[in-house]
């Protein structure tokens, strides 16, 4: 009966580790997606600035 208790404890420990690994993976994936969105937003704002600069140049030449 004692070996069954040890096996059950090991099983529970492995399930806990698996659960933590899954939660960690989801957390890292979420952080990665947030980082990518930030980069896209920065890129878009740079493009908007360039468009504004070019628009001003065109307006001055006209």
Image: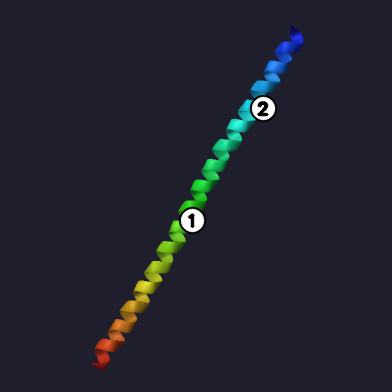
Q: Which residue lies at the image location 52% right of the left edge and 43% below the top edge?
A: 27
Percent position (x, y) of residue 56? Answer: 28, 84
**Left-right relation of 15 to 59:** right
Specify the farthest residue to the top: 1
* Residue under pointer 2: 14
Q: CA distance from mark 2 to mark 1?
A: 31 Å
Mark carried by residue 60: none
**Left-right relation of 47 to 18:** left
Residue neighbourhood size for the residue with mark 1, other residues' Cα within 10 Å, grouped as few (<14), some (14–19), many (≥20): few
Percent position (x, y) of residue 21? Answer: 60, 37
Question: Residue 18's quadrant in the figure?
Answer: top right
Q: Quadrant of the C terminus?
A: bottom left
Mark carried by residue 35: 1
Q: Which residue lies at the image location 37% right of the left edge and 68% below the top edge?
A: 45
On screen, 56 above or below 10?
A: below
- Mark with earlier residue (2, 1): 2
On screen, 28 above or below 56?
A: above
Q: Which residue lies at the image location 46% right of the left edge and 52% below the top edge?
A: 34
Q: Which residue lies at the image location 34% right of the left edge and 72% below the top edge?
A: 48
Question: Residue 53's quadrant in the figure?
Answer: bottom left
Which numbered mark, 2 or 1, is in the foreground of this view? Answer: 2
Q: Quadrant of the N terminus?
A: top right
């Amino acid at each position: 009966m004692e070996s069954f208790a040890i096996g059950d404890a090991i099983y529970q420990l492995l399930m806990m580790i698996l659960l933590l690994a899954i939660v960690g993976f989801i957390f890292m994936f979420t952080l990665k997606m947030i980082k990518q969105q930030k980069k896209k937003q920065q890129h878009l704002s740079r493009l908007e600035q360039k468009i504004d600069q070019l628009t001003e140049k065109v307006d001055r030449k006209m």
